[in-house]
Amino acid sequence: MRILVVDDDAMFRRGLRSMLESAGFSICEAPGGHAAVGIVRSEAPDVVLSDLYMPEGDGLELLHFVRVNRPGVRVIMMSGGSRLGTFDLLPAAKDLGASAVLAKPLRRESLLSTLGQLLHHSHCEQGELN
């Protein structure tokens, strides 16, 4: 499974890459929504794991792009809250089509469990599991 990790914090992206690669996933990275759009267009990852709040194209814009252009790609939105306040957009992201939402700081077990559920659900939809 190929996962695109999108976050403006390079150290956070590296940490996720390390965690997910050690669990057997193939990872690519983008520092923001605008860069992620190009990767989604050219590489069509299986899952996009994206922060909500980023200066170079926010997560909701990316979610909309993926839903319109690559509807089979699963999107997990994550957030530690807005730098502009405490308004939480994770429920809105779920309503707008995110496959799952996770609050930061991420726990390894929660992230891997969520990915496992999405993978299982994807295989069931494709009739690969009985």
Image (cartoon, helix red, strand yellow):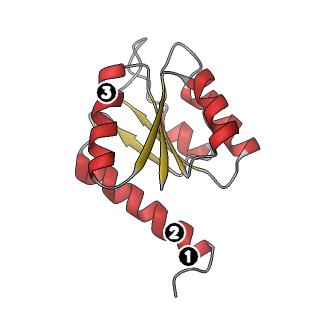
Q: Name the residue: 75% across, 43% down.
A: 69
Task: Check disc 3 and report the residue beneath it.
Answer: 12
Image height of 99 relative to 62, above or below? below
Task: Check disc 1 and report the residue beneath it.
Answer: 124
Can you give x and y, in whole percent of width and height, for residue 48 in the image?
A: 52, 42
Residue 68 as seen in the image, left or right of residue 99:
right
Q: Label 3 vs label 2: CA separation?
A: 27 Å
Q: Label 1 vs label 2: CA separation?
A: 5 Å
Can you give x and y, in whole percent of width and height, for residue 46 in the image?
A: 55, 52
Callout 3 amino acid: Phe
Q: Name the residue: 55% across, 76% down.
A: 124
Q: Quadrant of residue 128?
A: bottom right
Helix, strand or loop for disc 1: helix
Can you give x and y, in whole percent of width and height, for residue 119 in the image?
A: 47, 64
Residue 71 as seen in the image, left or right of residue 88:
right
> Mark 2 and mark 1 in contact (Cβ < 8 Å)?
yes
* Mark 2 neighbour density, 10 Å: few (under 14) some (14–19) many (20 or more): few
Question: How many marks can you see?
Answer: 3
Callout 2 amino acid: His
Please state which of the two labelled residues, at mark 3 or mark 2, is closer to the viewer.
Answer: 3
Task: Check disc 2 and report the residue beneath it.
Answer: 121
Foreground of the two, 60 or 15: 15
Callout 1 amino acid: Cys
Helix, strand or loop for disc 2: helix
* Mark 3 neighbour density, 10 Å: few (under 14) some (14–19) many (20 or more): some
Foreground of the two, 14 or 62: 14
Helix, strand or loop for disc 3: helix
In the rendered image, the residue lying farthest to the right is 68
Residue 1 as seen in the image, left or right of residue 18:
right
Q: Name the residue: 39% across, 62% down.
A: 116
